[in-house]
Amino acid sequence: MTIEKLTSNFELLGDWEERYGYLIDLGKKLPGLPDADKVEENRVHGCQAMVWLRMSRDTQNPALIRIRADSDAFIVRGLISVLMILFDGKTADEITAADVKSVFSRLGLDQHLSPTRKNGLFAMTERIRTLARGLAIEQNVANN
Amino acid sequence: MNEPKPIDWSKLRGDFPILGQQINGHPLVYFDNAATSQKPRQVLDAIRRYYEHDNANVHRGVHELSNRATDAYEAARARAAKFLNARSPEEIIFTRGTTEGINLVAATWALDHLKPGDTILLTELEHHSNLVPWQMVAQRTGAKLAFIPITGDEGTLDLSRLDAQLADGVKLLSLTHISNSMAVVNPVADICARARLAGVVTVVDAAQSAGHLPLDVQSIGCDFLAFSSNKICGPTGMGVLYGRRELLEKLSPYQGGGEMISKVEYFKTTYNVPPHRFEAGTPHIEGAVGLHAALDYLDAIGRDAIFRHDQELANYAAERLAEFKGIRIFGPKRGRAGLVSFVLPNAHALDVATMADQKGVALRAGHHCNQPLMAKLGVPATLRASFYFYNTRAEVDRFIEVLRGVVKLLGS
Ligand SMILES: Cc1ncc(COP(=O)(O)O)c(C=O)c1O
């Protein structure tokens, strides 16, 4: 799914119930992480639910970054799905350049992006960006 | 005595300007009172009046405004003493809240008296505010912690071994009066009496009981008792620590600064008498003024009546919640305080609270600053609805209806 497709799906949905219902469905379909990856070093803090995040370079094309994440709360899983559409399989530069805020505000979910909300979205976004910068630096070092 | 007039609860609700609003297009149902209560106009007016007419620093000037501010501050102390039936205003220390009150006892009495091998007795119910300060004291003094156990999902204390526990080197017992997640009302008078027989100093965390039921420190028989203003219609950043006079007189100071001294030289200081010895710096004068108005407001209603009202709502909510299949409701079957914590099957508390908020219902989701208790119950988080006298049965019905919608959406 592309972010354009997701946005137009969201626009077709009327009230918040339908939108949350859709978000929860996305959350239920999220592949998530195996239990072995649900460990402290993958934990993202700043959320009232449990959130785990793993990032790695794509095995075929090391310029691309793969993201896998999971949570015990469905809304958080739904928000993770949106982040995956935005970030998974992208380059570090694309990740750093993405305008997350405007995407979430088009989806009517921007209230979740505030650092004071306890849903982990802000913390996850920051973590993805930081890790992406780290992976990009390693990549540059390897190429030079 | 005349029969008390029936209370017009809906008229009281009208005193709370904040409650009339819509949240996300729905009437606000505020069920997070255990975290903080809303404030009636009377309290807001008192604070405004203070700033418009009487504001100055206390205990310092000889000018009229300073005298008025000092009088207002000390009148609040006397009012708080009466609220708790303390023997005198000198037994009332103003703090930032329950947390600071407990930390004050930890940093003074406990550090002065505890030695390696001594025991601090707590219960498994305690809020982090009544746990972490004692862990810190234990680390610094070499004292140990011990816990009065709970009996399961009902959350009542197992007191069958209390006397034996108390006899096991315990110097200090600190416990909550009402549990903020289990809605248990602990028999603090009985427990404190047994502690006193064992020569144990007692601290009562009254964060959830002050303003919710009548409190009398003399009949409870505790040495210290702490509560927060923000949970009982008063301003935030304000609290009360009661300390029995005989103990306060011998207590070391807490923080150093202005107000807490009687004579300062470059190399030494003679400290002020209690309670001023424990109130360094410019205090929260507006907080005291607002708290005074809040205590007047609550006592005009009657704390007995408030307790019965909140308990009825909580019992009604627990009864309605039992309609949900597979729900786990915490707290005692009888004698529940005015709140109810629960876990819905296959529905994360955060999801439920997030969606309830979309419908204007304010619930708390999380560990409620009770992480060890949640671990013991085997739940990562619970949902909590907590009530105060301005809440209504109609709001409980609304909350149940919203919850049904949320459960349906979650498909659980
Ligand atoms: C039982 C209990 N103790 C202590 C506290 C801490 O109160 P405060 O944060 O106002 O200091 C609370 C507040 O939630 C509480 O419920």
Image (tube, grey):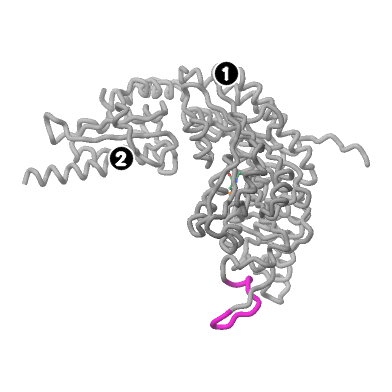
Report which residue position mark 2 lands on. A41
Q: Are marks 2 and 1 on the same chain?
A: no
Whether residue B304 appears in this view of the structure is: yes
Secondary element at tag 2: helix
Q: Is residue B234 left or right of residue A84?
A: right
The residue lying toward the viewer, choosing from B155 and A142, is B155
Where residue A100 appears, x then y in whole percent? Answer: 31, 37
- When the figure is inspected, residue B140 is found, relative to residue A21, above or below; the finding is below
- Which residue: 64% across, 35% down? B158
Whether residue B98 appears in this view of the structure is: no
Where residue B287 appears, x then y in whole percent? Answer: 65, 57
Q: Quadrant of the N terminus of chain A?
A: top left
The residue lying toward the viewer, choosing from A141 and A87, is A141
Q: Is residue B370 left or right of residue A140?
A: right
- When the figure is inspected, residue B153 is found, relative to residue B195, above or below; the finding is above
- Which residue: 32% across, 35% down? A39
Q: Tag on residue B390? A: none
Report which residue position mark 1 lands on. B324
The magenta stretch spans which residues? B257-268
Q: Give the prevailing secondary structure in the magenta stretch.
A: loop
- Which residue: 71% across, 77% down? B62
**In the orientation shown, which residue stands out farthest toward the right?**
B1
The residue lying toward the viewer, choosing from B23 and B342, is B342
Q: Three-letter amino acid code at disc 2? A: Glu
Q: Is residue B263 magenta?
A: yes
Disc 2 to disc 1, how far (Cα)? 37 Å
Where residue B153 appears, x then y in whole percent? Answer: 58, 29
